[in-house]
Amino acid sequence: MKNGVCGSLESNDCLITVESSETTEIIIESIVYDFYGDQIERVIADTLKQLNISNVKVFCVDRGALDYTIKARLQVAIERMSAK
């Protein structure tokens, strides 16, 4: 497995990059981090748990995306990482 990328840096979207790692790590850069950083991290962690995915590094550059957008972008990035 290599890297998987999905999303954009447009307003109300996010860019998710997923890569293999020794541990599970979530890195978030967001224009609304002070208000919603914990929620964004929870959505990512819950989605990884639902998909039974571990040992990945998730980079999320958020521009105000809603929860379902973050989840969808993460799922596609994981699929793209696995497909390579």
Image (spheres, rainbow, N blue to C red):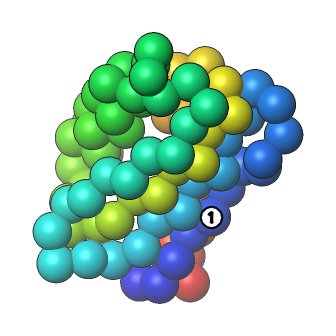
**In the rendered image, is residue 46 in sight?**
yes
Residue at point 34%, 34% (across, down): 41
Farthest residue, direction left: 23
| Residue 49 in the figure: left or right of residue 67 | left
Residue in the foreground of this view, choosing between 40 and 6: 40
Q: Measured along the vertical axis of the image, is residue 68 above or below residue 52?
A: above
The percent position of residue 29, horizontal first and vertical second, equals 52, 46
The percent position of residue 61, horizontal first and vertical second, equals 59, 48
Farthest residue, direction top: 35
Secondary structure under tag 1 reads strand
Residue at point 62%, 64% (across, down): 5
Q: How many marks?
A: 1
In the picture, the quarter occupied by the N terminus is: bottom left
The percent position of residue 53, horizontal first and vertical second, equals 25, 56
Residue in the foreground of this view, choosing between 59 and 53: 59
| Residue 78 in the figure: left or right of residue 43 | right
Residue at point 25%, 59% (across, down): 25
Residue in the foreground of this view, choosing between 17 and 75: 17
Q: Measured along the vertical axis of the image, is residue 14 above or below residue 27?
A: above
The percent position of residue 34, horizontal first and vertical second, equals 44, 22
Quickly name the residue at label 1.
5
Type of the residue with mark 1? Val
Q: Residue 19 is drawn in which quadrant? A: bottom left
**In the rendered image, is residue 78 in sight?**
no
Q: Residue 17 is drawn in which quadrant? A: bottom right
Farthest residue, direction right: 10
| Residue 82 in the figure: left or right of residue 70 | left
Residue at point 32%, 52% (across, down): 26
